[in-house]
Amino acid sequence: MLKVKNISRERSAELYAKAKTYFPGGVNSPVRAFKSVYGTPLFIKKGDGAYLWDADDNQFIDFCCSWGPLILGHNHPAIREKVIEVMQNGMSFGAPTALENELAELILSNNKFIEKIRFNSSGTEAVMSAIRLARGYTKRDKILKFEGCYHGHLDALLVKAGSGLVTFGETSSAGVPKAYADETIVVALNDKEALVKAFNDFKNQIAAVIIEPIPANNGLLLQRKEFLQYLREVCTANGTLLIFDEVISGFRVGFTGAAGLYNIKPDIITYGKIIGGGLPVGAYGSSAEIMSNVSPEGPVYQAGTLSGNPVAMAAGIAQLTELNKPGFYNSLDEKTTTFVDEMLDFVKDRNYPVNITQIGSIFWFAFDTKAAIRKAEDIDPHSMDRFKTMHQELLNRGVYMGPSGYEVGFVSAAHTTDILNTAKQAIFDSLDVVFGPSQPSPGGRALNEQTDYRE
Ligand code: PLP
């Protein structure tokens, strides 16, 4: 068993106390506040390869990877050097640069699903623009989304299902007018019957169906290809646009994302995260015909002061150039599969009620189940207590996962087999604490003294 590390969090705690005086909840994005796990947020000082260092100089193997963008690991030299080179010439012009063309060429010449693209600065912006485009193009208002898919914090999609097979969205955030939520229909994933009913109930009213083709924001709710194929057919038959939100899956499960993996052509694809190499970039793409509706070519307005920012474009170019090299995804996926398979063998041997879902380099621990979960409602909220304990135990053993059991883990190219083996052992020991007779680590919930399990 790996020695437990009773990490000091004094500096992080001080920074968090200060941050609470500046920001609501002490953070600039809610999940970072550690509300779903024990302790207070770690303030990060540095990242390199597969590792993070916090403000107290504790070192962690990182499976959060900035929530997905860092598929090459932290501080990759190719990205860093390209960004520094481009920054020598200035950081923003609000005018076109050759770098935008270069990134677009790299994407479009390797992606048969889209012909034109528009860059902006976040996944939320990409989705918001895609929705407006779909509404402008179809001249319809309603949007259909799936319970358990997250598409950013735009009003129209901050809705959750009410009760019933097909529901109007109920706002899941204060400040979203009911009238907006009323334009959003919510159905369960993996439910053809609900989909058919929605299309019957709202004939000729649905502008777009939006889905994370690999739903990865509420656990990893892998859908059958057949369901996605059916979605494609039903959208085509009803004159509704199909939007694949590939902010996570884009460039993660392959250079052409889930569309390429399943070989299904959506009408619009949204990207974020990986496309920016760690800097803020979002994008949406479609056929030349649909994109011709976007301003200034067409009537659908969309703009951005920092859209196509040269430094962000440079990071994207450097990252995607690495991803486009032969064998990149095979090696990343193989490594992840071995890692996950060995963990599955472990939980099976121990008869722990855990399932680990994986696709490409994304993985997720589902507790209190051994079966694959495909719908949000099938996740037992009480199982999140297991994750809470595991998260704490992992931190004590030098492994950082996103601070919520609903979040997935990401493996990067910088996670070597040796690093994955070290992480795996920490995961085994932590699972033994969650399920077995082992006691919680002595640092417990307080975490004071300093030792290093790597010594
Ligand atoms: N769409 C999906 C599938 C996402 O996972 C996210 C963020 O996690 C978004 C949209 C929003 O992206 P951003 O946080 O960059 O606004």
Image (spheres, rainbow, N blue to C red):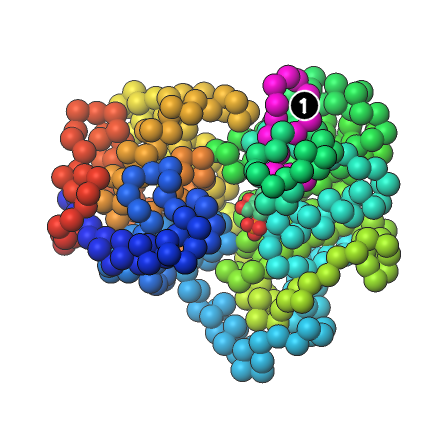
Q: Classify 421 as above or below 166.
A: below
Q: What span is in magenta?
A: 156-169
Amino acid of disc 1: Thr
In this rendering, position of residue 99 left or right of residue 343: right
> Quarter-wise, where is residue 101 in the image?
bottom right
> Quarter-wise, where is residue 425 in the image?
top left
- Is residue 62 in view from this perspective? yes
In this rendering, position of residue 266 left or right of residue 401: right
Q: Nearer the viewer, residue 151 or 284?
A: 151
Q: Position of residue 353 (x, y in %)?
A: 34, 21
Count of marks placed on residues = 1
> Quarter-wise, where is residue 380 in the image?
top left
Residue at 80% across, 50% down: 287
Q: Position of residue 252 (x, y in %)?
A: 54, 48
The C terminus, quarter of image: bottom left
Q: Residue beneath label 1, please?
A: 167
- Where disc 1 sits, the SS reads strand
Residue at 60% across, 55% down: 122
**Crowding at label 1, few (<14), some or many (≥20) Cα neighbours within 10 Å?**
some
